[in-house]
């Protein structure tokens, strides 16, 4: 086998949708274990190989939730805030080895995970899933969900030579959600 050039930390769970006083501590711990500790453990094991690479890159999948916070989503938001801090720290720590470290911050992404979040919000609010979808889209100037392919293309760019001067950055791909919230 060859070496390792790119690490993309993309494993994660959305966790529960509930007010903080109703959260099960075990569910909180599960989100932190997967989203934050999992990224740490994979990264620490990959860094020795990345130090031997001629064009190494680490890409962490965080979320706009790590910048904005979401009501009733504190475990998820907290874990994504943690990934932002981890990304910033690693970019400074590993830059001397030529290892670029960035984070992609998706907004609401098309797919089953977002549908489950909408169902959780609808259950809490008493609204329909469609009403919750409309509310979610209303805070984005482009009024649509993020296509997962767009995230993959951004990751490919960051991992390529075209992204060789980009490190320590938090790159939102959120249909302008952060600007409108």
Image (cartoon, helix red, strand yellow):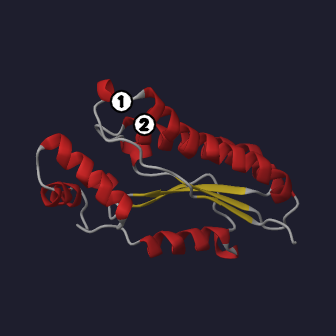
Q: Is residue 94 left or right of residue 163?
A: right
Residue at x 24% of width, y 63% of height: 141
Say few, some or many: other residues with alpha carbon within 10 Å of mark 1 (under 14 / 14 to 19 / 20 or more): some
What residue is at 65 percent from the left and 75 percent from the top? 162
Q: Is residue 6 above or below residue 77?
A: below
Left or right, 177 with respect to 46, comes to left
Q: How many marks overall?
A: 2
Q: Nearer the viewer, residue 81 or 117?
A: 117
Which mark is drawn over residue 75?
2
Q: Nearer the viewer, mark 1 or mark 2?
A: 1
| Closer-to-camera residue (171/112) | 112
Classify residue 175 by image quadrant: bottom left
Q: Is residue 63 left or right of residue 34?
A: left
* Residue 16 point in image, percent of width and height: 36, 41
Mark before the other along the chain sequence, 1 or 2: 1
Instruction: Evaluate if marks 1 and 2 touch, with contact meaning CB atoms under 8 Å apart.
Output: yes
Q: Specify whether residue 64 is in view.
A: yes
Disc 2, SS = helix
Location of residue 145 in the rendering, given as x and y in whole percent from the top left corner: 31, 67
Does residue 90 lie above or below 115 as drawn? Answer: above
Q: Is residue 181 visible?
A: no
Q: CA distance from mark 1 to mark 2?
A: 9 Å
Crowding around mark 2 (Cα neighbors within 10 Å: few <14, some 14 to 19, many 20+) is many
State left or right for residue 72 relative to residue 131. right
Q: Which residue is mark 1?
A: 23
Q: Residue at x 54, y 45 (%)?
A: 35
Under tag 1, what secondary structure? loop
Foreground of the two, 90 or 71:
71
Percent coordinates x, y for residue 9 in the rendering: 61, 56
Q: Residue furthest toward the top?
A: 21
């Amino acid at each position: 086998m060859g070496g390792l050039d790119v690490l993309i930390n993309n494993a994660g769970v959305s966790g529960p949708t509930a007010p903080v006083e109703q959260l099960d501590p075990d569910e909180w711990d599960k989100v932190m274990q997967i989203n934050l500790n999992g990224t740490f453990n994979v990264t620490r094991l990959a860094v020795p190989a990345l130090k031997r690479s001629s064009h190494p890159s680490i890409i962490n999948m965080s979320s706009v939730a790590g910048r904005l916070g979401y009501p009733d989503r504190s475990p998820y938001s907290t874990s994504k805030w943690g990934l932002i801090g981890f990304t910033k720290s690693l970019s400074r720590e590993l830059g001397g080895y030529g290892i670029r470290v960035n984070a992609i911050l998706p907004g609401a992404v098309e797919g089953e995970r977002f549908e489950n979040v909408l169902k959780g919000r609808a259950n809490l609010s008493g609204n329909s899933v469609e009403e919750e979808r409309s509310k979610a889209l209303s805070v984005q100037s482009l009024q649509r969900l993020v296509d997962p392919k767009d995230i993959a293309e951004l990751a490919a760019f960051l991992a390529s030579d075209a992204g060789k001067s980009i490190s320590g950055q938090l790159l939102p791909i959120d249909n302008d959600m952060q600007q409108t919230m």
